[in-house]
Image: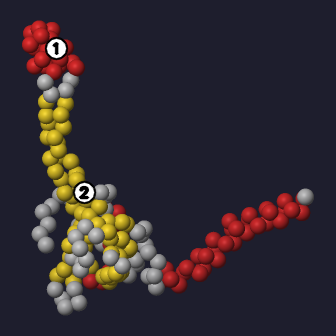
Amino acid sequence: MLIVMLIIWILVLWFFLVAPKRKEKKMAPKIAAGEVPAAENTKTRHVVGLPVPEGAPCFVQVYTNRVAFLSASKRFEVPMSRITEATMYTDTEMRQHIQSSLFQTMLGGAAFGGAGAVVGAMPHSKYKREIAKYNLMVSFKAKDGSDSAIVVTCDDSLKDLARAIHPDGNEPGDDRVVEL
């Protein structure tokens, strides 16, 4: 029984101490060559810039030397050396919020009777600006030297992805009008 416990302890120690180091040694050449993504895959939807339909699912992978867009079983890559800017911007919309207050009903009833209660109970509508979706525009120089851009959209913030693609670019997150 003691021997079995000792063997289990040795296996557990090997699994946690030796195996990760072997994996790091195996991955080191791939990391140096830029073959391992520097950021997580981000699932987005294509807006414009790729030869796939608008709204098609698109995965964005950031490597140390390139950015890959995977959509419609195709892979599109842009070398980091040709990327000029990566900017996140938001699409906002005005959404209507209807509010009614019990306090206003009671106050209207106390001040003006039944008619005041009815007026106090009437719902009030307010319009608030809310972020509908986040967009990421990656601007780059095409092979022929022309300026090009790829735009993808997502329901979650793409600020970290924009920083991973172009860390020394403009501060992502500011609302700007972007013309393509």
- 115 sits to left or right of 56: left
Indicate the position of residue 137 as horizontal and vertical percent values: 23, 70
The residue carrying mark 2 is 133
Instruction: Give x and y (percent) for residue 61.
Output: 38, 73
Q: How crowded is mark 1: few (under 14 residues within 10 Å), some or many (20 or more)?
A: some
Assess whether mark 2 and mark 1 are in contact (beta carbons under 8 angstroms).
no
Label 2 neighbour load within 10 Å: few <14, some 14-19, many 20+: some
- The amino acid beneath tag 1 is Leu
Which residue is at the front of the view, 177 or 106?
106
How is colour applied across the structure in the image?
Answer: secondary structure
The residue shown at (21%, 23%) is 101
**Residue 9 placement: quadrant:** bottom right
In the image, what residue occupies the spot 59% across and 76% down? Answer: 24
In the image, taking residue 21 as reference, residue 164 lies left or right, namely left
- Residue 171 in view, yes or no: no
Q: Which amino acid does label 2 sit on?
A: Lys
110 or 160, which lies in front?
110
Q: From what the image shows, is residue 96 above or below residue 44? A: above
Q: Give the numbered dot on residue 107.
A: 1
Element type where label 2 sits in the image: strand
What residue is at 90 percent from the left and 58 percent from the top?
1
65 shown above or below 112: below
Q: Which residue is drawn at 14% across and 15% down?
A: 117
Asked which quadrant contains residue 97, the reply is top left
The answer to which of marks 1 and 2 sits earlier in the sequence is 1
